[in-house]
Each structure stands twice: as structure tokens, then as C-alpha cells.
Image (tube, rainbow, N blue to C red):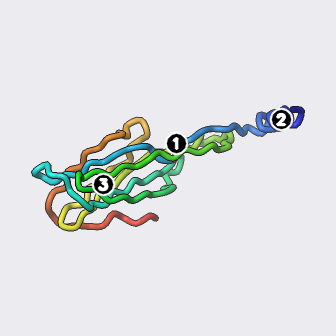
Amino acid sequence: MKRFITLAALLCLSGCYPVYKTLQAKTSFVVIDESRKPLRDAEVILISSAYPYGDEKSRMSKFTDELGKADFNSIHEFRIESLMIHGREEFFWNWCVYKKGYETNQSQNTGSDNFSSANTVMLKRGNSQPCKPRL
């Protein structure tokens, strides 16, 4: 018990504190074509990034099923953060949907407050361009 109190006091003095972070949001995508029919085998990539620098942290790829659906589970982790001038690490998510013969559909900087747990993405026929690789 004495060790625990000592450790807690040292953490407080150092400006460190434990947090439970959502590294990847739980979400699902339904990919449809212009006639609202589900698209099978469309690649859906969920990209996790974090402020303050906007760096990409991870990406997860899934292919849609016969109903045009791709599901992503949430990923959480306990971390130790410290008080910094730039603030704390804040995660946000973007996505990219690709299928050959259709225009690639990609989101732009979807903050964690605006990210939806259910997304319907319509792909239009056109030139395909694979999702941009991780930088």
C-alpha cells in the first residue's frame, strides 16, 4: 500500500496521469452504387490519426460483404499521458472506400465528435484510384 501511495504521488508530481483512450471508433459502413444497390468487395479503410500533429497512427482495412457492409470494432487502450503545452493526444478518424470501376470516396478530417457509428457511402462509376498509402 505504501508503494502505491508513493507511485501515485510521483505520478502527480511529474504531471503524468492515466487515461483510457479510444484508438479506433466502432463504426460500420454500407457501400452502395448510384442505383442504391449494395456493392460487394469494396475496400473500406478506417484511418486513425491523432492531434496535436495530425499524424496517422493506424489503418484497418475490410472488404464489404454481399449486403455492402463492413464493420469495424472499437479499440481502446490505457495510457499514461503527461501535461504538455500542446495539450493531450486526441484521436480522430477518416475513411477511404475503393472499388475498381468506381470513383474513390474519401473523408476529410472527421473529428471524433462528428464521426458517425453508421455510414452509408455511395460510389459513382468512374476512374478508380486506390486509397493513398500511409505516409
Q: Tell me where residue 59 sits by quadrant.
A: bottom left
Residue 123: percent from left, percent from top: 19, 55
First in residue order: circle 3 vs circle 1:
1
In the foreground, 70 or 133: 70
Residue at the far left in the pictured view: 35
Above or below, 127 relative to 84 = below
Identify the residue shown where x is 10% and y is 51%: 35
Per the model, the C-alpha gap separating discs 3 and 2 is 47 Å
Q: Which mark is residue 22?
A: 1
Above or below, 93 relative to 60 = above
Q: Which mark is residue 4?
A: 2
- The label nearer to you, 3 versus 1, is 1
Q: Secondary structure at mark 2?
A: helix
Q: Pointer 3: what residue?
A: 106
Residue 13: percent from left, percent from top: 80, 35
- Disc 3: CA contacts within 10 A as few (<14), some (14-19) or many (>=20): some
In the foreground, 122 or 68: 68
Per the model, the C-alpha gap separating discs 3 and 1 is 22 Å
- Residue type, mark 2 in image: Phe
First in residue order: circle 1 vs circle 2:
2
